[in-house]
Image (cartoon, rainbow, N blue to C red):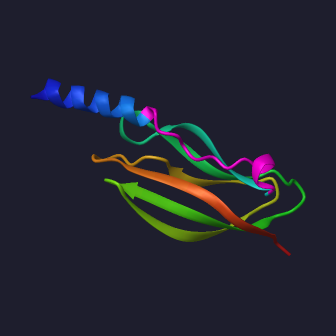
């Protein structure tokens, strides 16, 4: 029975690694902030650590993100507001959950405003 679960986890992790992780780049979006990835996390390390990064070294920002969680084909979206310092980096979470069945998380920048 253990080998069945290992095989299933291996199959699932192989499939999950083929799924794209949504990363918003500053140059493509026109925003000074971007969602970046670094390192591994989540079940079997299939996820990426996700961060909000501010490329503007002189200004802080109020950034609105659309966070989406997809679980068993159903998506749930919510808006998040983040204050990020000049040149700062803020941890958002992991792109995949630790428990089965996996939940996939993405973040997309909707707007940004310079902080006073």
Number of on-image labels? 0
Residue 27's x, y, as percent?
80, 47
Side of 75 where 81 appears, left or right:
right
- Horizontally, is 103 left or right of 19 in the view? left
Question: Magenta segment: does it hold 113?
Answer: no
| Image quarter (top left, top right, bottom left or bottom right) of the N terminus | top left
* Residue depicted at x 81% and y 53%: 87
Task: Name the dominant secondary structure of the magenta segment.
Answer: loop
Task: State the image coordinates of residue 69 (x, y, percent, origin top left).
Answer: 44, 58
Q: Residue at x 47, y 38 (%)?
A: 19
Question: Residue 8 location, x and y as percent?
Answer: 23, 31
The magenta stretch spans residue 26: yes
* Residue located farthest toward the left when viewing the structure as drawn: 1
- The segment highlighted magenta reads 17-30
Residue 39: x, y in percent?
A: 56, 36
Residue sitting at x 40%, y 36%: 16
């Amino acid at each position: 029975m253990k080998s069945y679960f290992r095989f299933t986890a291996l199959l699932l992790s192989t499939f999950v690694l083929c799924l794209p992780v949504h990363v918003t780049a500053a140059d493509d979006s026109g925003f000074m902030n971007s969602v970046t990835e670094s390192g591994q996390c989540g079940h079997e390390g299939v996820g990426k650590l996700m961060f909000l990064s501010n490329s503007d070294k002189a200004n802080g920002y109020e950034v609105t993100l659309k966070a989406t969680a997809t679980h068993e084909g159903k998506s749930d979206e919510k808006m998040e507001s983040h204050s990020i310092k000049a040149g700062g980096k803020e941890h958002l979470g992991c792109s995949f959950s630790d428990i089965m069945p996996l939940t996939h998380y993405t973040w997309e920048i909707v707007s940004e405003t310079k902080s006073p």
